Image (cartoon, rainbow, N blue to C red):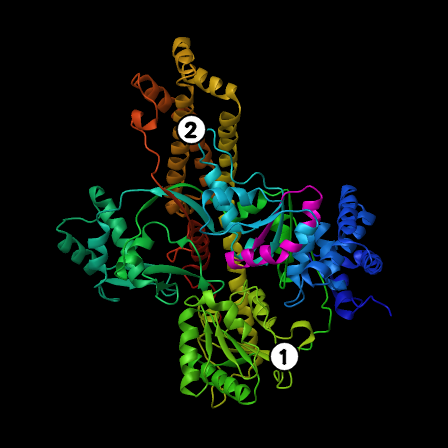
């Protein structure tokens, strides 16, 4: 039988299209044929013989076709024995492609986990240090444990780095050949390493090779998320009183909110009420700048941040919700005091102020690796972005069995209420027929509201959202039972397949029903892909409305459809095209924001690398401190010699590192302040990005002189018996902690630049206006 099952029309279409960022994986088909043939001949060989053969193959290098074939044949047979998982041809094609540096698009349920095992083992066996980045801690721990038997059989060590590990266990885990973790865990440990004291080994030995599961979700959707290392700081005393006052303000009286509900401002009455309550004459006076800032933050917490949409309250804490996935974003906080304001708004214990010691984007972490590969069920849609951002090419691996899922056209309605009524009716009918149903929603509040609607119609639904995502594996495991109904927020990165239970296939397989579309068609496809796994029957349909956020935030429709159906259904192709246009506009805005944010951080990344090179030299090379002290006292050799003495040299090094870290922290603070108003430079016919880059460069150039002056002052005034930083009046934070800065509801600097320029071009109009 001809094993070349991948020669199908869809593969030829992709080949002819020559889409940007895509790769034709057909060149690896002969290698897959050879792997299958050699694996069949290895059934009679012993484990030790297989492991030695795999090791010898990798010694020849993965770029050698014969070596790659032999290794994957051995590893495939070993996975059959140790994991009871024998890789199919499609999985081998994916593994070959990834080991040759490509990203692969594999449909849900096609065995990406085993592919990850094979690729990680191949890289690690070739003497590469490998990180496998998972979507969350649960998946990292699960996959490290599941792949352990295969890795150990091939002579490789494996571990997982997750939250809650003690420092010793964390350091030990990082020394494994293969480390499973999230990109956030790796990023946080890199930030910790960059603050380490003399004599302390780095947690992360090096960033060598990385395999990224759900690569588009990790390196595109989360790419612009800043990872923050913070130290404890004194709480702002004005916060509590101001939050209490603003909490009693009413929209339209003391404050106003703009049309897209992304910014709010006090009215004259609101300012007057604040001044009266705080017993001050002018809230805008320079001496009250902290009060004014606290008032604006409190207003945004009161007017723009919504419980069960932007955050949930669980176990006495405010837990932020990831917009892209509708689930709790672990270790994530809002910046600029907003987190504390929301905690006060909810009457919770305030977790405390923090001063940012260092931060970097998720994308910066990814760019630190020498070799990047990965996989996803929706990588093909992200191919152009992956090539633009990271220089990666993407190839699609056809499914092992033809996909029989039926993707139905959207059912567009006039209003959200009519959309929900129609969707509930469709769920009720499918449930009555014994068909399992998965409903995708955009927020926690929407998932719970729709579940209540179904309950009132006599349909009990399991809810999977940010309030119970710890139970996701259990909930998803039951989602394929005949007649089961599951209401979920975004399914990306869940990492658990929905398998059909007895009788479910006969009822039509899984029905995936989306309530409105997401801002990205790629996220829609992730939801659709939950049905029809491995040739299972299934269908998908989206119920949409002209009141969906993806429409109202992008377009202004002045004249509604003329003749909708009695149930609100809109059958006009014109409005269907309009909805699709709104989604494309939303995708375009997200892409522009992504690009703008990256550009603002490029200079910071360059400056961080330059400073870290100096810091690492100070930690590793004794002459680096000599050079530094020479610059501090170019004309005072006696002082240089005094601080070079064995008993005090370490203290001098600690002082230099302290002031380098402090100067970097203050540089970040100054640049954050500059970004707040940099968009206004456009009024002077200046390019905000160019101006920011120039400001950052000038500020960074002054850091060395700033550090040397501070070191000179401290060491010259040091008491003779000084033994540590505390004896010099210096204090590092007593505790450090890590978190991610989530999207700020009142906009990042990139938001403001994009919106400001857009308003200038449009003359103050909305983001996009369509007259129908």
Q: Looking at the rendering, which quadrant does residue 247 occupy?
A: bottom left
Horizontal side of 227 relative to 117 (left or right) equals left
Tell me the number on the disc at residue 752.
none
Q: What percent of the width, then of the height, locates residue 266?
A: 25, 58
Q: What percent of the width, then of the height, locates residue 556?
A: 44, 70
With respect to residue 664, does 300 lie above or below? below
With respect to residue 127, does 148 lie above or below? below
Classify mark 1: helix, strand or loop. Answer: strand
Q: What percent of the width, then of the height, locates residue 30?
A: 84, 57
The mark tally for this picture is 2
Segment colored magenta: 121-149
Q: Mark 2 points at which residue?
A: 657
With respect to residue 456, does 706 lie above or below? above
Classify mark 2: helix, strand or loop. Answer: helix
Q: Looking at the rendering, which quadrant does residue 588 occupy?
A: bottom right
Q: Looking at the rendering, which quadrant does residue 634 occupy?
A: top left
Q: Name the residue under label 1.
A: 538
Q: What percent of the width, then of the height, locates residue 648?
A: 39, 18
Gap between marks 1 and 2 measured at Cα? 60 Å
With respect to residue 404, does 297 lie above or below? above
Earlier in the chain: of badge 1 and badge 2, it is 1
Q: Pointer 1: residues within 10 angstroms few (<14), some, or many (20+)?
A: many
Toward the viewer: 398 or 477?
Answer: 477
* Quadrant in the picture for the N terminus: bottom right
Which residue is most to the right? Answer: 1
Q: Is residue 519 visible?
A: yes
Q: Pointer 2: residues within 10 angstroms few (<14), some, or many (20+)?
A: many
Kindly identify the residue that appears in the image at 26 percent across and 51 percent down. 294
Q: Main secondary structure of the magenta part?
A: helix
């Amino acid at each position: 039988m001809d094993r070349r099952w991948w020669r199908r029309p869809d593969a030829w279409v992709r080949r002819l299209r020559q889409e940007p960022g895509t790769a034709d994986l057909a060149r690896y088909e002969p290698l897959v044929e050879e792997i299958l043939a050699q694996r069949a001949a290895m059934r009679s060989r012993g484990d030790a013989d297989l492991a030695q053969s795999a090791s010898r193959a990798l010694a020849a290098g993965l770029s050698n076709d014969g070596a790659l074939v032999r290794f994957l044949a051995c590893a495939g047979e070993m996975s059959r024995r140790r994991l009871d998982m024998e890789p199919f041809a499609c999985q081998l094609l994916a593994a070959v492609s990834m080991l040759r540096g490509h990203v692969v698009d594999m449909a849900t349920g096609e065995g990406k986990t085993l592919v990850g095992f094979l690729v990680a083992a191949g890289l690690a066996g070739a003497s590469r240090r490998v990180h496998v980045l998972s979507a969350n801690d649960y998946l990292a721990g699960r996959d490290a444990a599941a792949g352990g038997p295969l890795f150990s059989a091939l002579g490789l060590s494996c571990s997982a780095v997750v939250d809650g590990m003690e420092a010793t266990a964390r350091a030990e885990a990082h020394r494994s050949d293969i480390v499973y973790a999230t990109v956030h865990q790796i990023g946080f440990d890199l930030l910790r390493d960059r603050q380490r004291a003399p004599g302390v080994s780095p947690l992360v030995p090096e960033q060598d090779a990385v395999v990224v599961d759900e690569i588009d979700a990790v390196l595109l959707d989360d790419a612009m998320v800043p990872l923050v290392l913070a130290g404890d700081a004194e709480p702002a005393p004005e916060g509590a009183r101001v939050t209490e006052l603003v909490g009693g303000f009413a929209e339209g009286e003391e404050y106003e909110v703009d049309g897209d509900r992304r910014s709010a401002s006090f009215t004259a009455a609101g300012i007057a009420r604040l001044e009266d309550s705080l017993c001050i004459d002018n809230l805008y006076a320079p001496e009250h700048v902290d009060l004014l800032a606290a008032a604006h933050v409190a207003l945004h917490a009161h007017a723009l941040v919504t419980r069960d949409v932007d955050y949930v309250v669980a176990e006495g804490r405010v837990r932020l919700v990831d917009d892209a996935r509708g689930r709790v974003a672990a270790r994530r906080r809002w910046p600029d005091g907003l987190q504390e304001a929301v905690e006060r708004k909810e009457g919770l214990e305030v977790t405390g102020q923090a001063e940012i010691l260092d931060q970097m984007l998720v994308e910066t972490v990814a760019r630190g690796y020498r070799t990047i590969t990965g996989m996803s069920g929706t990588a093909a849609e992200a191919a152009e972005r992956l090539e633009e951002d990271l220089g990666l090419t993407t190839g699609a691996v056809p499914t092992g069995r033809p996909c029989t899922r039926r993707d139905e056209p959207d059912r567009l309605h006039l209003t959200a209420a009519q959309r929900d009524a129609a969707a509930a009716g469709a769920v009720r009918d499918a449930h009555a027929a014994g068909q399992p149903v998965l409903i995708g929603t955009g927020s926690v509040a929407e998932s719970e509201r729709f579940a209540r609607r179904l309950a009132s119609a006599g349909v009990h639904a399991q809810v999977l959202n940010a309030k119970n995502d710890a139970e996701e594996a259990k909930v998803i495991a039951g989602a394929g039972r005949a007649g089961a109904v599951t209401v979920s927020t975004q399914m990306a990165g869940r990492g658990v397949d929905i398998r059909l239970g007895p009788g479910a296939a006969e009822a039509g397989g899984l029905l995936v029903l989306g309530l409105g579309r997401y801002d990205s068609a790629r996220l829609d496809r992730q939801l659709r892909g939950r049905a029809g796994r491995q040739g299972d029957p299934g269908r998908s349909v989206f119920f949409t409305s002209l009141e969906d956020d993806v429409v109202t935030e992008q377009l202004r429709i002045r004249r509604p459809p003329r003749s909708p159906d009695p149930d609100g259904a809109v059958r006009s192709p014109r409005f269907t095209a309009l909805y699709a246009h709104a989604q494309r506009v939303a995708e375009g805005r997200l892409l522009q924001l992504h690009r703008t944010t990256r550009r603002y951080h490029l200079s910071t990344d360059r400056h961080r690398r330059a400073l870290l090179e100096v810091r690492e030299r100070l930690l590793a090379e004794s002459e680096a401190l000599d050079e530094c002290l020479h610059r501090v006292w170019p004309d005072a050799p006696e002082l240089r010699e005094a601080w070079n003495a064995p008993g005090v040299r370490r203290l001098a090094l600690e002082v230099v590192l302290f002031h380098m870290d402090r100067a970097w922290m203050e540089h970040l603070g100054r640049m954050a302040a500059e970004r707040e108003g940099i968009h206004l430079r456009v009024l002077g016919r200046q390019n905000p990005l160019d101006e920011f880059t120039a400001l950052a460069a000038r500020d960074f150039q002054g850091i060395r002189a700033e550090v040397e002056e501070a070191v000179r002052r401290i060491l010259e005034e040091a008491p003779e018996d000084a033994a540590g930083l505390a004896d010099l009046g210096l204090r590092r934070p007593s505790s450090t902690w890590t978190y991610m800065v989530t999207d700020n509801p009142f906009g990042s600097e990139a938001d403001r630049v994009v919106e400001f320029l857009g308003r200038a071009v449009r003359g103050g109009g909305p983001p996009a206006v369509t007259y129908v």
